[in-house]
Amino acid sequence: MSGVGVGIGQRPDTPGQKAVKVLWTGVWLVFLGAPVRDLLTAGHGPVALVLGWAGLAVFVVGYTLLIFRTGHGGRSEVVLGSLAALAAESTALVLAFGEAWLVLFVYVAIASGAALPPRAARWSIPAASALMAGLALAVPGNAERLILPLLVPALLGGFAMTGVRELIRTTIALREARATVAQLAANEERLRLARDLHDLLGHSLSLITLKSELAGRMLPDHPDRAARQITDIEQVSRQALVDVREAVTGYRRARLATELAGARVALTAAGVSFELPSAPAPADGPPEASEEALAWALREAVTNVVRHSGARHCAVELLHRATPDGPVLELSVRDDGSGRPGSAPGNGLTGLAERLERAGGTLETGGVRRGFLLVARVPAGPGPA
């Protein structure tokens, strides 16, 4: 008997929303026809009529205010006090005017279900119904015939409103959870973008720096060779711009063949001798997620060799291995530079470990004798025959 279904779970803030909720609440007040008919036709005196109309108006206002609290929480003791006042007023009106006013307790029960928490409503609804039944037996006339017709809607309506209140709370909780999920997704996307930009720009800027230094040394004596280095710098810069744009739009996908070619260029420019494998053939290659994770691992490893290790030689291996959990593709990058065992991993290796974990793989890094070793493993498709 209320309009909680209109804008369910939302406080009516605008005048239009308030008007709609008042309208829907007012529709159910039509069942107050019995008290109104009693005041109009029972021949009460002037004083009784004034008191009756005033009491009915106060009851309607109190009931409407309680219904407007639906789903908004608040102090239970205040709501209980308001319901007690409503029940006391209903008792007084029934005792003063007779059985036609017993219907007020149906509204008291419904307001209990709408405004009280379920634990409290579990007791207040039967209490209001029991008080109504007791008054029906106490007032003069044949009011006991109304007990069952009024008891059923009081109990059903009250507990139905308890369910509506819980539905509102669930709706609000779902809205909040949806907002939280959206925030977490945005944070994850920011982390993905930061990780991709680190991998992309760290590699490209290192190569640009090396080639710029090389061009600067060549410029006085070998301007032609310096010009070639500058041309390479332009190509690397343009490719970096393309990669960044693709990473921002979310469509970029790293490939092993591309990263192996890039590793060859970077190591050559840095003056590091190398051993590189051939890329897997498309028919025998790993799943897309695994290949992309390995491609990022190769890029991060080669960038670290060029920028940090001071190595003179770098060996890259790409092997299929059989494990108890299924076939894996293993990428190992070993250099003879100054690996630092026990040092904390940087942002690049931390992001790489997270990327491999999402692809179902693992990352191992550490200093070895005469160098540093990075091993990345991902689930593989069928190995080569």
Image: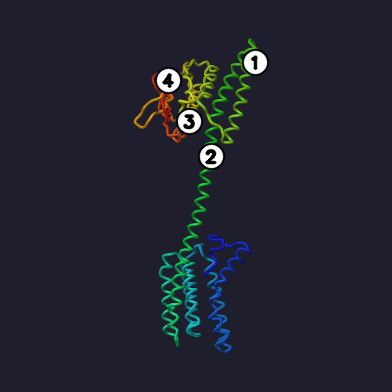
- In-front residue for pair 149/42: 149
Badge nearest the viewer, 4 or 2? 2
Q: Is residue 378 left or right of residue 192?
A: left
Q: Given the image, on which type of amino acid does mark 1 rest?
A: Ala
Q: For mark 4, what is the residue?
A: 371
Q: For mark 2, what is the residue?
A: 189
Secondary structure under tag 3 reads helix
Cα–Cα span, label 4 and label 2: 35 Å
Cα–Cα span, label 4 and label 1: 34 Å
Secondary structure under tag 4 reads strand
Badge nearest the viewer, 3 or 4? 3
Q: Residue at x 49, y 51 (%)?
A: 177
Cα–Cα span, label 2 and label 1: 40 Å
Q: Given the image, on which type of amino acid does mark 3 rest?
A: Ala
354 over 27 or under it: above or below: above
The percent coordinates of residue 65 (x first, y second) are: 54, 69
Badge nearest the viewer, 2 or 1? 2
Which mark is on residue 293?
Answer: 3
Disc on the earlier residue, 3 or 2: 2
Q: Residue at x 57, y 89 (%)?
A: 45
